[in-house]
Amino acid sequence: MSADPTDDRLCEFSFDLRLEISRALGAWLEQGERARERLHRATQRVCTEAHTLKLSPDQVVAALGELFERTPVAGDGDPERRRAAWQEFTQSCISAYYNAGDVE
């Protein structure tokens, strides 16, 4: 992931959140289930920021796609594991986004 906090090309997510996502996914790739809680916290932050920024689900998916392209491969570097982790994370973020909308 780009470490530049001024990178405006990335969606509206805060630099801190982008960094947290990168670290949480890296931990997930290296530690698996032991890192699930960290990934869950990042998911909840994505949901919170997305609602605050009034992003549509499509915008959330697009932003996460950009992050996927920029985040360095962690762990053993297996591209399939990395892709699977991103897919699970994206699905979790969208699910949380919609479920939070039901509560509000």
Image (tube, rainbow, N blue to C red):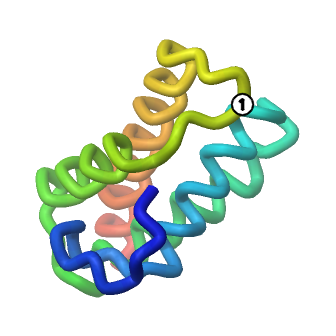
Is the residue 88 above or below the residue 50 in the image? above
Query: Which residue is at a point 43% across and 79% down the rendered structure image?
Result: 15
Left or right, residue 77 beside residue 18: right
Q: Quadrant of the N terminus?
A: bottom left
x then y, percent, for residue 64: 31, 51
Residue 68, image quadrant: top left
Query: Which residue is at a point 18% across and 50% down the rendered structure image?
Result: 62
Query: Which residue is at a point 13% across and 63% down the rendered structure image?
Result: 56
> How many other residues sit within 10 Å of disc 1, few (<14), some (14-19) or many (≥20)?
some
Is the residue 82 above or below the residue 1 in the image? above
Three-letter amino acid code of the residue under disc 1: Gly
Which one is in front, 84 or 78?
Answer: 78
Is the residue 25 above or below the residue 30 in the image? below
Which one is in front, 33 or 71?
Answer: 71
Left or right, residue 34 beside residue 16: right
Q: Quadrant of the C terminus?
A: bottom left
x then y, percent, for residue 39: 65, 52
x then y, percent, for residue 40: 64, 55
Query: Which residue is at a point 55% across and 34% down the rendered structure image?
Result: 73
Q: Secondary structure at mark 1?
A: loop
Residue at image mark 1: 75
Residue 51, image quadrant: bottom left
Tally of marks: 1
x then y, percent, for residue 93: 41, 52
Left or right, residue 88 beside residue 78: left
